[in-house]
Image (cartoon, helix red, strand yellow):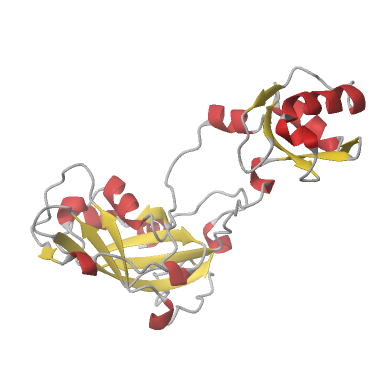
Amino acid sequence: MLAAGADRTLPPGATALEIPTPSDRPAFVTRPSYGNIPPAATAVYLPPEMLTEPRATRIKAYLNFTADPEAEYYARRLAYAYITPPEAPCRAKPGPFIRRVFRTLALDLPQNFELLPPARGADATVRFRTPDFREAALGRQPFVLDGVTVKLLRDEETPGVRRASNDYIVHAALRDYPIEQRTVEWIKSNCCRFGYVREIDPACYAAPDLATVRVVLELEHPREIPHELRIDYYDEYGSTSVVPVEILRVWHRSHSYDANGQYVPLFQAQVEAA
């Protein structure tokens, strides 16, 4: 149970981190309302120039989805083959050379892999029969034959792929949020430009129109959170819901996960402690 006077805006024992200054946060992000959804009753008119984000804004999205085990298994079978030096003649037709590399340098490994079209800037994509076969091949590197190197990389190791470290949790308030979009699906979709929605305060669903919706977001850095969320209904009248976004608290994600790596809900804990 929470002690009297305890802070209910962050988990017990968590240290509140610094909230970004207003100048460090974007003025707004615009989210389209797909599916011919009628504008909210409280929508206002905004001209197109007030819905267009600055060109310098980096487009980013936090996807709310459950990983498909079959897709994950398939991805773990793939390796991306990079051939150096760049002027090596075999790069014109990398498939035969890659097979010769395996027959010459790794004949004890399974040779029944498939060669797929290149991706991730590689010379070829290699699909092994199992993830274990892929890992065995990766462990036998480097592959150097006739002065040419074939380097196999996992997807997350390929050039240009950046994996964000979502170390922060933010308790945010969405002010004046339209009741017509007050569902789990719409809230997650509308917030995806600035955070992965971990939790939504269940009290918001029964609240009156324009009541505040409180969410818990997991994200790379709290300065990604805009001052306003603008929901564009894409009609001829420029109908838009303008939702001010307030950062209530910021803390490190370690305070929101238990020893088994499971997320610990903030709002559920508050209900139990009430």
Residue 123: % across, % down: 69, 37
- Asked which quadrant contains residue 103, the reply is top right
Residue 218: % across, % down: 47, 59
- Asked which quadrant contains residue 236, the reply is bottom left
Residue 237: % across, % down: 8, 58
Residue at 44% across / 68% down in the picture? 224
Is residue 142 visible in this depiction of the protein? no
Residue at 41% across / 66% down in the picture? 57
Residue 15 vs 80, above or below: the answer is below
Is residue 168 visible in this depiction of the protein? yes
User: Viewed as shown, does residue 173 lie left or right of 5?
Assistant: left
- Asked which quadrant contains residue 153, the reply is top right
**Extreme top residue here?**
112
User: Viewed as shown, does residue 91 lie left or right of 210?
Assistant: right
Q: State which quarter of the image contains the C terminus.
A: bottom left
Residue at 81% across / 30% down in the picture? 136
Q: Nearer the viewer, residue 78 or 244?
A: 78
Residue 101 vs 236, above or below: the answer is above
Numbered circles on residues, count: 0
Residue 66 vs 6, above or below: the answer is above
Q: Nearer the viewer, residue 149 or 249?
A: 149
User: Viewed as shown, does residue 205 lie left or right of 238?
Assistant: right
Q: Nearer the viewer, residue 165 or 122?
A: 122
Residue 145: % across, % down: 90, 34
Q: State which quarter of the image contains the N terminus.
A: bottom left
User: Viewed as shown, does residue 136 lie left or right of 78?
Assistant: right
Q: Nearer the viewer, residue 87 or 221?
A: 87
